[in-house]
Amino acid sequence: MRKILLFCSCLLLLAMTETAKSNVFPYPYKVETLPNGLKVILVPMNSPGIVAYYTIVRTGSRDEWEPGRSGFAHFFEHMMFRGTKRHPGGVYDSIITSLGAEANAYTTDDYTCYHLTVANNDLERVMDLESDRFQFLQYPEPEFKTESGAVYGEFRKGRTSPFNVLWEKIKETAFDKHTYRHTTIGYEEDIKNMPNMYDYSKSFYQRYYRPENCVIVVVGDMKEESTIAMVKKYYGKWAKGYTEPKIEKEPEQTSERTATVTYDGKTNPILAIGYKNYAFSPTNKQLIARDLLSDLAFGSNSKLYKRLYLQEQKVISFQPSFQMNRDPFMGLVYAMTTEENLKYVQDEILKEVDSFSKNVVDATALQDLKKRIKYSYVMDLDSPKKVAGNLARFVAITGGIEQIEDYFATIESITTQDIMEAAKSLTPEKRTIVILKGSN
Amino acid sequence: MKNKLKITAKALILLLTITIITMPAFAQATAKEIEAKTLLIKETNNPTVSFNIWFNTGSVHDEVGKDGLSSIVGEMISDGATKKHTYDELLNIMYPMATGYECKVDKDMTVIRGRVHKDNLEKFTELLIEAITEPAFTQEDLNRIKKQRLDYLEKTLRYSSDEELAKAVLHNEIHVSTRYGHIPEGSVDGIKSITLKDVEGYYKKYYNRNSFVVGLAGGFNDSLPIKMVNTLNDKLASDQLMVNYVMQMPIEGLEVVIIEKKNSATAMSIGYPISVLRDDPEFVPLSLFNSWFGQHRNQSSHLYNVIREKRGLNYGDYSYIEAFPNGGALSLPDPNSARRQQLFEIWLRPVQHQHSLFTLRAALRELKNVVDNGMTQSDFLKTQAFLSKFCRHYTPTLASRLGYSIDNLFYGVKDNQNYPEYLSKKINKLTLEQVNTSIKNHIQYKNLKIVFVTADAEKLKQDLLNNNPSPITYDNEKSAEILKEDKEISNFPLSVNAERIKIIKVESVFQK
């Protein structure tokens, strides 16, 4: 049952209700945009004395369009902890420590997120610190080089996972031009070269860490008016200057792609089958129908999952993956199986897509999925950190929270016919199949 | 010896407590009995209910030769059929509710956990009770669960994360020759040997009406705990509770295990058993020390600053006075791993092979420094201010608060169902002297188990045996202070005898 508890597609992190007209997001929220373009979303909720403070930079590994720069958005996330003139690295750290903050950051393909959970009476101190580093970051070259060692260490610790090796190969196989071709951690050779990119790091900061490219989300026990006033005080003078990255559009895929990659260790083979998708839009029915389809066809209550995993026991794990992205990405299904069952499992997945394209899905199954999304959502928003964390990707992709109700309305509107059309659209020429095998 | 006696006494008190509240089958429990067998955190307006059903058993009860049995039984309950429903049917029923239950099996405790929206409370409760009291234990489910577990042990744990591998081996080595000496997931041979008869036998013996506590949190009504206790009392067997005691083997000097594996970086874990549990007066002073020395995934960790921030050798370096399973994936501990025997542990994230001994030396040198000199007043005050506030993050949700309170029931800590507040008050009352006394009493650097996962085991062995210096160079400018310190680190003595170095090929770890 653990798999049920842990299961989450992007949809499950968000919400819908049975009546599309009512508000789905359960908390009132306020949105304000400063003249410099910085957007602020405030979500007051009952969380005595605690607030979550998230700064979402709408830049991730997608924005690494220059050759040899893969992994740089993530590396730069590390540099954001190296201080400013007012708060040099050690001073920043010691203040964060004195606040007892739970503080960290992460980088994804489409955005970078800096987050702190703190006592609400420390909120102003946090804004002072965060606004300072977002406007006046300053670090000496030796510290830049030292941090590159930590990033290389992060790469090394992750490299032992077969899924990371597979992920790199999937992206490389499916994309030719777009920056989704490389992973967020980046290629090893680019990471090795990071110590030599001190000057580039300053340019990266100047281009992307700008108010019109950032959204601040504050959730928890706070007063709206005073919080907005603080944001204006600390971020009001942040200068505009965002420069668009020159990301190449991915040409339309015209034929099926396949690849095999070897993992330097023992593992059962892992099969990944993906289909090129649309850029995320809360109102794109075709996209959202595909998301629902992936769960209906391959999720933990699907017929195929139950047959391959429970009855025939021909897979060790089996799950779909569907993610919101700013540019067209992929929907995928993963199966860990054995060498002798590899072809069988692959054929069964493809047959299932075909079957969904020819047969109307059971209306009850679709309704059950919609209910599941609703309950997952309600249960997953039980702390400021979880609310802010769950909103982060939606905010990063769409630029705000305003379209969230449209998104749930679209989910609610999906019909069994839409699911069938979605399956029909998963044609072989849009497909990428990658198999990872161990060096057993 | 003093500490061992203390642990035994603690376990006896727990046993006595549970024996006292034993009830005959089919009897309706009295209010007092219900109170003794429940832990309730009620929030009427909360739209969900969280469940923590604690059974006082764990991998310490695995039969010899059947390592992993307790964990397989747990999974048969959480991921298997009941007498009324196939597993397929259970998935089907719970799917629209977006719920389910899992069984977390640790060394001394087993907790069945779930969370459900109030709309679905009745149905979920029925299914949860059914899973606990009427498991079907089918051969089909056992085959699937065993197959998955073997894949985890033989492939995932051995190959997919060297740092998790080092930690798992360390835990086994620290408790070697005791019933604590295997990870709850078991061993390859142990799992292969498990039959349905073993599963049924374990279940009957340890999932009994003398061994459970029902933990509930959220928007439930008063009838729910009564119903659950009465039903479990009615349907579970009545075997007497068995508590296994762990007689710890002493560690002499530096005892090294090198797991040889083709890899590009060396992972290291260091540790030794400690007797201080959460109810011990020295637990909070040691918590403060540990927070300063190696707060998990936090830039305030001293080790992190020495090894990562100043030198950039790896991704992070941390320490622990309580087991922290799955630490690579979590920023805060997942409750329900309470134990009768804990360990002090240092986790050094992978470093380039040529830096492994330097990094080990840096960590041991820092450990020696704090043992010999204690914490400074300045570090003490900073850490006190940090930890007294930071600990409020331990329970961000009601479900995690419930988990901590169940653990504290295990330890006999009266936290008034709010562990962060309990802990924060105690931290604020600490003195530097108390902390430094506890460091002297319980932290040491001479008798340690050290586990490496690395590519060239023989070279590492020779470097250790010869106490070869481990000088380091950087490709960037370092301060004179760091370079001076580096010289001391590279010559920090490592006294290891040949008979205390063991090399194990990765393909044989967790085999037996």
Image (cartoon, rainbow, N blue to C red):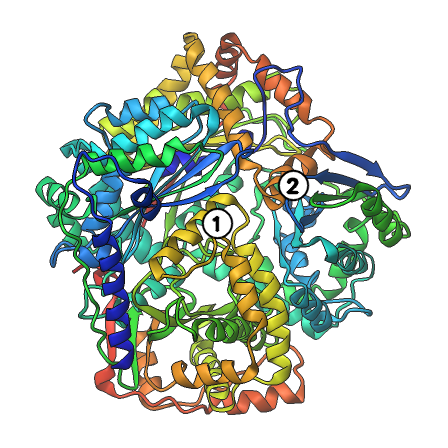
Q: Secondary structure at mark 2?
A: loop
Q: Are marks 1 and 2 on the same chain?
A: no
Q: Within 10 Å of the Cα at label 1, are there few (<14), some (14-19), or many (20+) other Cα atoms?
A: many
Using the numbered discs, state the Cα–Cα distance from disc 1 to disc 2 in whole angstroms: 16 Å
Where is residue A258? Give x, y as percent.
43, 34
Left or right of residue B67, residue A63 in this image: right
Q: Which residue is mark 1?
A: B401
B412 to A5, vertically: above or below:
below
Left or right for A169, reference B209: right
Q: Secondary structure at mark 1?
A: helix
Which quadrant does the C terminus of chain B fall into? bottom left
Residue nearest the viewer, comparing B183 with A375: A375
For image coordinates 53% across by 69% down, the residue present is B426
In the rendered structure, the answer to whether residue B135 lies left or right of residue A365 reads left
Q: Residue A46, labelled with which disc?
A: 2
Q: Residues within 10 Å of mark 2 (few under 14, many from 20)?
A: some
Toward the left, the furthest residue is B197
A273 shown above or below B405: above
Amino acid under disc 2: Asn
